[in-house]
Image (spheres, grey):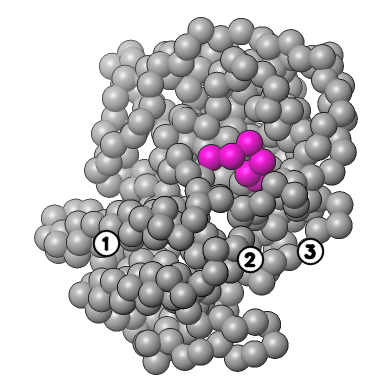
Amino acid sequence: MRTAGKDLLADALRDARDYTIHLLDDWAAWPADAPPDPRQVPCLDIINPPLWELGHVAWFMEYWCRRYRGAATAPLPSRLADADRWYDSRHVPHDSRWQLDLPDWDATRRYLQDTLAEALEALQRLPHTDAALYFHRLALFHEDMHDEAFRYTRQTLAWPGRDGLADLPANTDIALDGGEFLMGSSASAGGFVFDNEKWAHPQRAASFAISSTPTRNSDFLAFVAADGYRQPQWWSAAGQAWLAASGQTMPRYWRQAGGRWQQRRYAQWIDLAPEQPAIHLTAHEAEAWCRWAGRRLPTEAEWEYAARHAGDFDWGTQVWEWTASPFLPYPGFSPDPYAEYAAPFFHTHRSVRGGSFATRPRMRNACYRNYYEPRRDDIFIGFRSCPLR
């Protein structure tokens, strides 16, 4: 989809918007007296109120695909007089989103429909160039990201949902000779590129080995059963601070019930599946397990090298993966017009790679850089490890 032409791109935009509108219809029809009620969502720093987030998705497409005229020129007006005041995440503080006088569900649905129609109309007038199609591709991937985030919200609030986790194939360590490679997206390849992938630059990976699959529940359970959460030698200083603040003695969504280990998946507690990937783990937990197991997290460069060069490297279909690397700009970085996409998060977040069962396949790319604070365990994230050199 990064190189999709106008027809394929139009189909993808319709597909993404159909998903979003279906989600809105599902929530709008929810009986107010039957929990969970999407109208009464607690103010948490890891989620947005659904009605605001749905409107934001529509606003983003409208702004970048129809209204934006360059940084030096004022944008065209929105079809909603107060849309910028409501939905521009760059200027609407997170906690204030629960107090806004937002349009209702029906009006938000119309806004989603109308902004798609306008974007598709604008798309047909554009030339067939990467520069011309940039903002429509950006709007597509932005909507896909929010559609995945809606599933995080379901998990966080214990709403009904379905996941796509399955038993992992047999795991082995893949030995790689390493060498110099171009890390990041190439300017000569064409197509859409996120600004934090710019540009491909020489990177050297020393010889290393890396597990062929993410870490399993059974592997992480051994650490929990060994009382690893109460043994400070496995935890970094930041990890110990997180433990003290959270009080956790096991992963966020685990429990013991009737002598069995269980895990909450959306609204249901189910028996822990030993061969499925460990999920909903902070970077601190991933690092502690690695120290206990005599292993380490891969660096971001090692992860990308393996994704490009290792044929048996299974990634992108079940859980996002923590790396050992802080989220930093590549050499010569400069932000794209949507400057707030990545730059505000450099140096404070951790680089995350791959994808999850909730990630649309068109989002998956070996160069794609996701990023989260190391404390985040609400997302569909796990890790894989490397043996110590």
Tell me the element at label 3: loop
List x then y, in percent, for residue 351. Answer: 68, 42
Q: Kindly indicate the quadrant of the structure image that contains residue 344.
A: bottom right
Residue 241 visible to an observer of this rendering: no
Residue 271 visible to an observer of this rendering: yes
The part of the chain drawn in magenta is 364-369
Which class describes the residues within 10 Å of circle 2: few (<14), some (14-19), or many (20+)?
few
Label number found at residue 334? 3
Q: Earlier in the sequence, mark 3 or mark 2?
A: 2
Residue on which disc 1 sits: 21
Quadrant including the C terminus: top right
The kind of residue tagged 1 is Ile
Residue closest to the far front: 127
Look at the picture and state if 45 lies above or below 162: below
| Residue 366 belongs to the span the image colors magenta | yes
The kind of residue tagged 3 is Ser
